[in-house]
Structures are given as C-alpha cells and as structure tokens.
Image (cartoon, grey):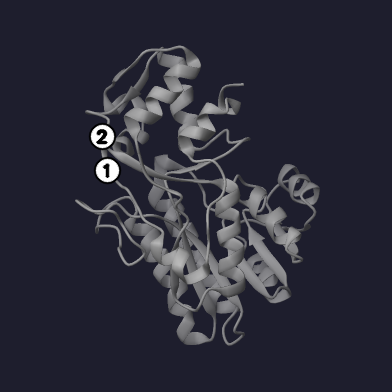
Amino acid sequence: MRVFVTGASGWVGSAVVPELIGAGHQVLGLARSDTSAAAVTALGAEVLRGDLDDQDALRAGAARCDGVIHLAFIHDFTDFEASVQADARAIGTLGAAMEGSGKPLVVTSGTPAVTGKVATERDSSAPGSPGAGRDANGAIALGTAARGVRPSVVRLPRSVHGAGDRHGFVASLIETARDTGVSGYVDDGSSRWPAVHVRDAATLFRLALEEAPAGSVLHAVADEGVATRDIAAAIGRHLNLPTAVAPAEGFGFLGMLLAIDQPASSAITRDLLGWRPVQPGLIEDLDKGHYFA
C-alpha cells in the first residue's frame, strides 16, 4: 500500500514511517520545510512539500496514495483553539479528497479524561474540556464513513515516550525540574496519566491502516495510568533532585493536565485488532536513562 503521512518527520511520525516501510508499504510524507524534507527522506520515504494549510498538497497526497495517516498537529498551546481549527480543516480536506474511494483514513486524537472511571474507546471528553475539540475533529473523520471512506481514530495518551523524545510532556517535566531544582507534582500526585511507547503506538497506527473497520475509535494505551508523583519520583532519582508538591502554575499549560486524573484503557482496541504493546512502560523507560543523557 502507498500511504500518505502528514507529520511524517515528527515524533510519532518518525516511528510510524519506518513501521510502515518495514511492513512493505511505501510512504509519501508531507514536509513543510527543508529540514523536515531531509528527515522524511532519511526515514526512507518520498517527500511531498506542503503544510496543514496547503489544501492542494493535502488533496494531492490523498489522491496519489492508497491510504492516509494524519499525524500532523500544530502544538501551539498559546492558541490551542486555532490549532484545533487547522486540524479540522485538514481532516475535512483529506476526507473530501477520499470520498467514494474506500481508502483508509487514520486520524489522531487524545484519550479522554472521564471523572471517576478509566476511559474507554466508547467515552468522549467532556464539553468544554481541552480534549473536546480534538474529539470533534475525530467525529469529522468518522463521518466520512457515510461517504465511502474507511476512517478510524487513534487516540494517544498523555505520554508517548521513547528514546529521542525531546518535546513531549515528560521531556517538558524534566526541563522544568532542571530549571526549578525540584521534581514536582500537583496536589497529592495521585492523578494518573496513561502512557505508551512510541514504537508500540506506531504499530497501532499501521494496524488501523491495514485492518480497522470503518468508524473505529482506538486507544494507543499501554500503561492505563501512571501516578504523576511516580513520574516525578523517577525524574528526581535520575536528576538527583528532591520530589515535592509544586504549584500548578509553575508547569505552564501542563499544570492543568497534571491535576486531572485521566487513566484510559485499550481493552477494546486489543480485542479488535490484536494489538499488544511490547515496549517498556513509562517508568521503566525513564529508568533506562536516555531522557537524562
């Protein structure tokens, strides 16, 4: 299968592209800059120049390929709503270009936080919450099933970890700990984050492309919920820093996420596609030391 991948040079994309190529697929990767283009080429993929606002490039990529994996997202948390709107426009363009084709369209979202329970693939984010916008974008994609597309949504947890992660949430917590001299957590640290190794996530994106029935919502979750105080303790051990309660505002936009208990399950996904995470969990991965080199 020839696959168009947006965000091919990003953190998750840099794992998804080799996963696809290793399974015998060809990849056309969207690249917005010379640096991104060089990274896509180094991964073994062909390059299509453009970005999320380049509707012609998105349509061309979808038309030239047998399926699409949409990973790109503008991670500007100073104007998150604008990023969500750009994502919605891109999904709409890709879906329209694929109408009547029967091709798979795999888009990316996040696992929801559901008060008092472990979130499943059947749950949605509460209206007005940070995840609601991306849930709505996932619904745009799933709506293309009625127009002859085979859509699915892969929801990623708060931590997508692994060697080479320099901009994810855990990397940000490590940077904050270095800057402040304390590895902190919010409140009592009992709030939990779901997590997955980036290579396990890449496997699920491939399975979604190859096998997911139209309308599937999938959770790329290995660790259902790691207590944020345990994350802070692991960071403190490796940086030789004390672990303590810290004010939420000291973490920027992450402060709110640290305060919310948001465990998530992937039981439905595992039953549907036979996906089985095999890479290290979050704490084990932190203890390998590569985040602190």
Q: Is residue 162 above or below residue 244?
A: below
Query: Which residue, as the protein is rendered here, is positioned at the far left?
Result: 116
Counting the numbered discs, the total is 2
Dot 2 or dot 1: first in sequence order is: 2
State the image coordinates of residue 96 (x, y, percent, origin top left): 55, 78
Residue at position x 55%, y 60% in the image:
204
User: In the figure, is residue 136 to the left or right of 271?
Assistant: left
Q: Is 136 placed left or right of 293 in the picture?
A: left
Q: Nearer the viewer, residue 10 or 32?
A: 10
**Residue 122, visible in the rendered structure:** yes
Q: Residue at x 59, y 84 (%)?
A: 102
Residue at the spot 56% in from the left edge and 72% down from the top edge? 105
Residue bearing mark 1: 261
Q: Is residue 84 above or below residue 10?
A: below
Which residue does the numbered mark 2 point to in the structure image?
190
Which structural element holds mark 2?
loop
Disc 1 on helix, strand or loop?
A: loop
